[in-house]
Amino acid sequence: MTLEFAGRVALVTGAGRGIGAAIARELGREGCDVALVDLGAFDGAETTAGTIRGMGRRAIALRADVTDLRAAENAVAATVHALGRLDILVCNAGITRDAMVWKMTEEAWDQVLDVNLKGCFTFCRAAAPVFRTQQQGRIVTMASINGLRGKVGQSNYAASKAGIVALTKSLARELGPSGVTVNCVAPGMVATEMTVALPTEVVEKARM
């Protein structure tokens, strides 16, 4: 446990598996109470919440569709109600629907942009009033190296992650005067349930 995190309250989206679950566990180890938000992997969020409670911290699992602003607002309100405050927001929820552009469906494009980019906006929008009122807050968004350099077969995913970079920079300027920091992480290929499901040739190219 570190003094920097002790007693803080964090909300992590996409916390049911992979990077999100790992972030939530590490925040718990560092002394945070944690709200874990997920939809498709909600059972995983509940399991990870139990793990964090086993560390002696408070943790709740919340089922929410990140593309729905009202659901995001409800999740933030539920976090404040159950855990007393909100100090840290980690926007991690993301999906892939890979295809070359001439094969990509409009639905695949919309799904990825909605979950990855809009899902980041909705939770930042929901948390911003809380952070501005308390004149303190930390927002961490999850982009990708592919949002910086592009990726064959991932035009929707890369565009969504590039959008997150721009959103992060804008929010840092908007919220900075209120004592809120907004930063972005852009990881490369990480072994998670999402990347394991990718075609073998995609994974092999990422290792090059």
Image (cartoon, helix red, strand yellow):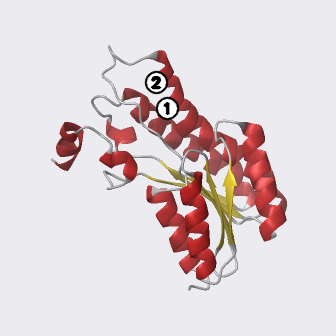
**Residue 22 image point, x, y percent:** 47, 65
- Decide if residue 152 is on the left or right side of residue 169: left
Residue placed most toward the observer, 80 or 45: 45
> Pointer 1 and pointer 2: residues touching (CB < 8 Å)?
yes
Residue placed most toward the observer, 80 or 51: 51
**Residue 106 image point, x, y percent:** 48, 16
**What residue appears at the point 51 percent right and 73 percent down from the top-left corner?**
26
Q: Badge 1 is on which residue?
A: 112
| Amino acid type indicated by mark 2 | Ala
Residue reaching furthest to the top:
102
- Decide if residue 184 is on the left or right side of residue 208: right
**Residue 45 image point, x, y percent:** 58, 59
Q: Is residue 124 above or below residue 29?
A: above
Residue 4, located in which quarter of the rendered image? bottom right
Q: How many marks?
A: 2
Q: Residues within 10 Å of mark 1 (few under 14, many from 20)?
A: many
Q: Badge 2 is on which residue?
A: 108
Q: Is residue 208 above or below residue 58?
A: above
- Decide if residue 130 is on the left or right side of residue 138: right
The reply to whether residue 26 is visible in this rendering is: yes
